Image (spheres, rainbow, N blue to C red):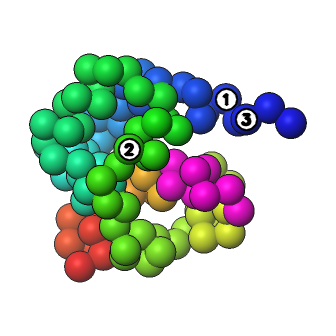
Amino acid sequence: MPPHRIFTTEFAKVYPLYVQKAERKNRTKSEVDQIIRWLTGYTAAGLAKQLQQQSDFATFFAQAPAFHPNAALIKGVVCGVRVEEVEDPLMQKIRYLDKLIDELAKGKAMEKILRQ
């Protein structure tokens, strides 16, 4: 079976959609960046470099400096899929990010989103 299409999708093409979703709910691009950096361990410069290089999701997560150990605390449903039950590790990381952006758009406090 071929890999899921999202794995080869450029992260830089989806990133603006994350920002738009947050901004529609009066949240900011910097909050989206904070969530992405918390989850992946990228610095601001590292994130900017990934966006500039137009890395696909597989590369983006493979090159992530340090996936946050508290990511396992992310639970819930995104697009009808329970994130903690996703079997493919890459798909689960993508769903974790989707869930965090959803929580931001729903107005959750950053401390809760970042599992602090």
Q: Which secondary structure, mark 1?
A: helix
Does residue 16 sit above or below 66 in this rendering? above
For label 1, the residue is 5
Q: Which of marks 1 and 2 is nearer the N terminus?
A: 1
**Residues in magenta, as a range:** 87-95
For label 2, the residue is 63
Residue 53: where, in percent of width, then height? 32, 21
Work out how far the residue at label 2 is from the one at label 3, CA to CA, in angstroms. 18 Å
Most frequent secondary structure within the magenta stretch: helix
Work out how far the residue at label 1 is from the one at label 2, CA to CA, in angstroms. 19 Å
User: Quadrant of the rendered structure where residue 70 is?
Assistant: bottom left
- Is 88 included in the stretch rendered in magenta? yes
Q: Which secondary structure, mark 3?
A: loop
Q: Are marks 2 and 3 in contact (CB under 8 Å)?
A: no
Does residue 91 sit above or below 38 in this rendering? above
x 29%, y 26%: residue: 51
Does residue 66 sit above or below 25 in this rendering? below
Left or right: 9 as drawn, with respect to 71: right
- Is 114 included in the stretch rendered in magenta? no
Left or right: 27 as drawn, with respect to 60: left
Residue 80: where, in percent of width, then height? 68, 55
Which amino acid type corresponds to the residue marked 3 in the rendered image? Pro
Residue 68: where, in percent of width, then height? 34, 67
- Which quadrant is home to the N terminus? top right
x 52%, y 38%: residue: 58
Q: Do the residues labelled 1 and 3 touch (CB within 8 Å)?
A: yes
For label 3, the residue is 3
Q: Which secondary structure, mark 2?
A: loop
